[in-house]
Amino acid sequence: MKARKFSEDQIKDLTLTFKLLGDHNRLSILLNLTSKCHSVSYIIKATGLTQTNVSFHLRKLRQAGLVRVEPRGAFKYY
């Protein structure tokens, strides 16, 4: 079996991703989005977090490229 070599940039990116997912709330949000897109209202109900907290964590997940937003009328789905 041949070992795969990772660049320092790849390792740095993975380290940041694992740190990001080490937060209980962000991991909970991400796990609630594994099956389909959901609105922020759904995520709030599913996680029990406040709207401000959900928005904060979604922004972090979006910046890391782990979720994407789909505007649908007045609502945003992740």
Image (spheres, helix red, strand yellow):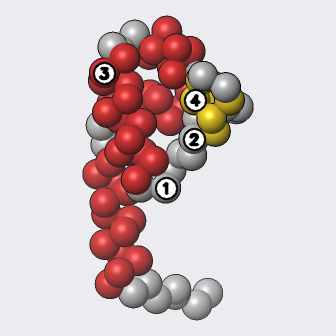
Residue at figure coordinates x 68%, y 29% from the top left: 72
Q: Which corner quadrant of the image does residue 1 belong to?
A: bottom right
Residue tagged 2: 69
Q: Which corner quadrant of the image does residue 60 belong to?
A: top left
Look at the numbered discs 4 and 2 and tell me whether their residues touch, using CB distance below 8 Å: yes
At mark 4, the secondary structure is: strand
Distance from Cα at disc 4 to Cα at disc 2: 6 Å
Q: Earlier in the sequence, mark 4 or mark 2?
A: 2
Q: Quadrant of the C terminus?
A: top right
Distance from Cα at disc 4 to Cα at disc 3: 15 Å
How packed mark 2 is, by other alpha carbons closer than 10 Å (few <14, some 14-19, many 20 or more), is some
Residue at figure coordinates x 35%, y 54% from the top left: 18
Look at the numbered discs 4 and 3 and tell me whether their residues touch, using CB distance below 8 Å: no
Residue at figure coordinates x 58%, y 90% from the top left: 2
Q: Is residue 77 above or below residue 9?
A: above
Q: Residue 48: x, y in percent?
A: 40, 10
* Type of the residue with mark 1: Gly
Q: Nearer the viewer, mark 1 or mark 4?
A: 4
**Label placed on residue 76:** 4
67 relative position to 18: left or right: right
Q: Residue 4: x, y in percent?
A: 52, 86
* Type of the residue with mark 2: Val
34 relative position to 25: left or right: right
* Type of the residue with mark 4: Lys
Q: Earlier in the sequence, mark 1 or mark 4?
A: 1
At mark 1, the secondary structure is: loop
Residue tagged 1: 65
Q: Is residue 6 above or below residue 16?
A: below
